Image (tube, rainbow, N blue to C red):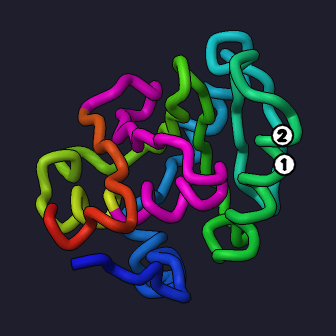
């Protein structure tokens, strides 16, 4: 059975309280990233969200993602930090999650859904969502299923 692409992203479906709970980044982390900018890549700001990116992605791709994060309410003026990388043909969206959430089934399912929307941002390319600790060390990789295979997951 082929699934239809929903009209709203999970960022809108879950509401801002969900986003704050799931992705709250302590100010200390933001300061650490600022001090270690070379480690995380180049930084661009999108409405309070620090989007770090590596040389494997273009500034045009970063701007497209940043605009999407603003439109979907993720970049909402609150301090957050994420990173975009690309390995081969796969984009890596790295996001810090609170301790233990990388093992939470609801959060993992949410990351799959988020990854599907990120695929649309990158014209259907493969996307892996990396759930990370406060130093952007990967705790769990969640590959984004494509829209047609989502019901089979």
Most extreme residue toward the front, as rendered?
A: 1
Give residue 143's quadrant in the image: top left
Q: Residues within 10 Å of mark 2 (few under 14, many from 20)?
A: some
Q: Secondary structure at mark 2?
A: strand
Where residue 89 appears, x then y in whole percent? 54, 27
Name above or below for residue 122 compared with residue 22.
Answer: above
Give residue 35's quadrant in the image: top right
> Residue at 36% across / 50% down in the picture?
144
Q: Nearest the camera: 112 or 37?
A: 112
Report whether 107 appears left or right of 88. left
Which residue corresponds to mark 2?
Answer: 44
> Residue at 38% across / 37% down in the picture?
130
Where residue 27 appears, x then y in whole percent? 59, 46
Q: Residues within 10 Å of mark 1 (few under 14, many from 20)?
A: some
Give the label on residue 41, or none: none
Quadrant assignment for the C terminus: bottom left
Highlighted range, magenta: 113-139
Quadrant assignment for the N terminus: bottom left
Q: Secondary structure at mark 1?
A: helix
Which callout, 1 or 2, points to the residue nearer the camera?
1
> Residue at 66% across / 32% down in the picture?
31
Where residue 86 appears, x then y in whole percent? 59, 25
Report whether 124 appears left or right of 24. right
Contact flag, marks 1 and 2 (Cβ < 8 Å):
yes
Name above or below for residue 32 compared with residue 50.
Answer: above
Q: Within the magenta stretch, is there residue 118? A: yes
The Cα–Cα distance between marks 1 and 2, rounded to whole angstroms, is: 9 Å
Q: Within the magenta stretch, is there residue 44? A: no
Which residue corresponds to mark 1?
Answer: 63
Dot 1 or dot 2: first in sequence order is 2
């Amino acid at each position: 059975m082929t699934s239809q692409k929903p009209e709203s992203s999970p960022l809108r479906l879950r509401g801002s309280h969900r986003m704050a709970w799931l992705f709250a980044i302590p100010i200390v982390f933001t300061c650490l990233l600022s001090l270690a900018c070379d480690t995380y890549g180049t930084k661009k700001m999108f409405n309070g969200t620090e989007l770090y990116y590596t040389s494997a992605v273009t500034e045009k791709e970063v701007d497209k993602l940043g605009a999407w994060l603003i439109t979907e309410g993720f970049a909402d003026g609150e301090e957050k930090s994420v990173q975009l990388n690309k390995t081969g043909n796969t984009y890596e969206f790295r996001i810090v999650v609170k301790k233990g959430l990388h093992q939470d089934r609801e959060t993992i399912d949410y990351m799959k859904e988020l990854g599907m929307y990120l695929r649309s941002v990158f014209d259907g390319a493969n996307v892996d969502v990396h759930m990370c600790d406060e130093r952007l060390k990967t705790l769990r990789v969640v590959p984004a299923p494509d829209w047609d295979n989502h019901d089979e997951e």
